[in-house]
């Protein structure tokens, strides 16, 4: 049987069992229990027990008759039967916890795989196969129209090569901005990025750029955090920018000005003089 690192010691039971003993007897008993837990059993020979406990034979012979009543012989060795019962229960509990941990890991893995499979179907695009930069997402549908059906399919925008396109190719529709954001965030290490997450959809509706979402994912991954933490970073960053601007922020985050640029901007700003002051 595997050795458990921690020996269960029920102080109430121990003190009750040794309440009428001398201090040396209780000390010897506790020392032998600790060695049994570490070794699995104890030798029968008094000389070996003395060496294990670091007791002189004279003192050992004086207190052993009382302590020996707590031990029984099994296979030529001495054991405390109750301590072995505790060992069995500890091993059983450890085994159940290990199995529960494996089942939990398997469930989490299956959920992650299910999300990875369902994301392309829910969002009309393959989040794992499309790797589009943020500047490739066009908001004007006319820019994605096919002007020349005879041109090479590789030069036709992806949205024009969807199902039923003039080229007759059965291709999936272009990924949504949420799917593209998912790709960017996964490329930064957040493999559980979900394009259907309501906070992500809200951020995109407010004009969040894929670049800033990818930056938030990079910071979250560096901090060993998850997808929700990255969304919180992006949302808080936009809220802070809106607060500093004293207006609601729509669109991309404004570029950060250098100290010189901010000084020049303040110099060019007209001054308002209150003559009634």
Image (cartoon, rainbow, N blue to C red):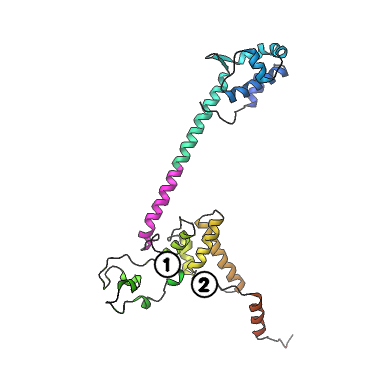
SS assignment at label 1 = loop
Describe residue 154's horizontal placement relative to residue 8 as left or right.
Answer: left
Sequence-wise first label, 2 or 1 = 1
Q: CA distance from mark 2 to mark 1?
A: 18 Å
Label of residue 132 in the image: 1
Q: Residue at x 45, y 68 (%)?
A: 133
- The answer to whether 265 appears left or right of 154 in the picture is right
Q: Residues within 10 Å of mark 2 (few under 14, many from 20)?
A: some
Q: Which residue is more in the foreground, 55 or 7? A: 55
Q: Is residue 175 magenta?
A: no
Task: Write down the quadrant of residue 59 in the picture.
Answer: top right
Whether residue 18 is visible to the viewer of this picture, yes or no, is no
What is the magenta range?
A: 104-129
- Per the image, the residue denoted by label 2 is 252
Which label sits on residue 24?
none
Q: Secondary structure at mark 2?
A: loop
Main SS category, magenta section: helix
Q: In the rendered view, tell whether residue 225 sits above or below residue 150.
A: above
Is residue 36 in view from this perspective? yes
x and y percent of residue 29 in the render? 65, 19
Q: Is residue 113 above or below residue 13?
A: below
Q: Indicate whether 169 appears above or below 143.
A: above
Q: Residue at x 28, y 67 (%)?
A: 163
Mark nearest the camera among 2 and 1 is 1
Give the image quarter of residue 123. Answer: bottom left
In the rendering, at what x and y percent does residue 182 appear? 44, 61
Q: Quadrant of the C terminus?
A: bottom right
Was residue 112 drawn as part of the magenta stretch in this picture? yes
């Amino acid at each position: 049987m595997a050795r458990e690192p921690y020996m269960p010691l029920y102080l109430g039971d121990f003190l009750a069992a040794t309440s009428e003993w001398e201090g040396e007897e209780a000390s010897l008993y506790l020392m032998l229990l600790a060695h049994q837990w570490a070794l699995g059993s104890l030798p029968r020979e008094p000389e070996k027990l003395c060496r294990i406990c670091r007791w002189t034979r004279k003192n050992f012979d004086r207190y052993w008759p009382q302590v020996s009543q707590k031990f029984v012989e099994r296979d030529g060795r001495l054991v405390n039967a109750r301590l072995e019962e505790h060992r069995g229960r500890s091993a059983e509990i450890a085994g159940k916890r290990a199995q529960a941990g494996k089942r939990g890991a398997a469930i989490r893995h299956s959920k992650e795989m299910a999300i990875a499979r369902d994301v392309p179907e829910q969002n009309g695009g393959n989040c794992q196969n499309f790797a589009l930069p943020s500047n490739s997402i066009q908001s004007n549908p006319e820019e994605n129209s096919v002007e020349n059906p005879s041109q090479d399919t590789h030069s036709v925008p992806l949205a024009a090569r969807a199902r039923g396109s003039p080229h007759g190719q059965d291709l999936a529709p272009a990924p949504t901005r949420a799917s593209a954001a998912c790709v960017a965030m996964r490329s930064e290490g957040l493999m559980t990025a979900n394009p259907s997450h309501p906070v992500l959809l809200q951020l995109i509706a407010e004009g969040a750029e894929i670049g800033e979402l990818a930056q938030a994912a990079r910071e979250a991954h560096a901090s060993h955090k998850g997808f929700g933490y990255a969304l919180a970073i992006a949302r808080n960053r936009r809220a802070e920018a809106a607060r500093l601007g004293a207006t609601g922020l729509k669109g991309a985050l404004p570029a950060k000005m250098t100290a010189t640029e901010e000084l020049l901007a303040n110099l060019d700003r007209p001054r308002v003089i209150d003559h009634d002051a």
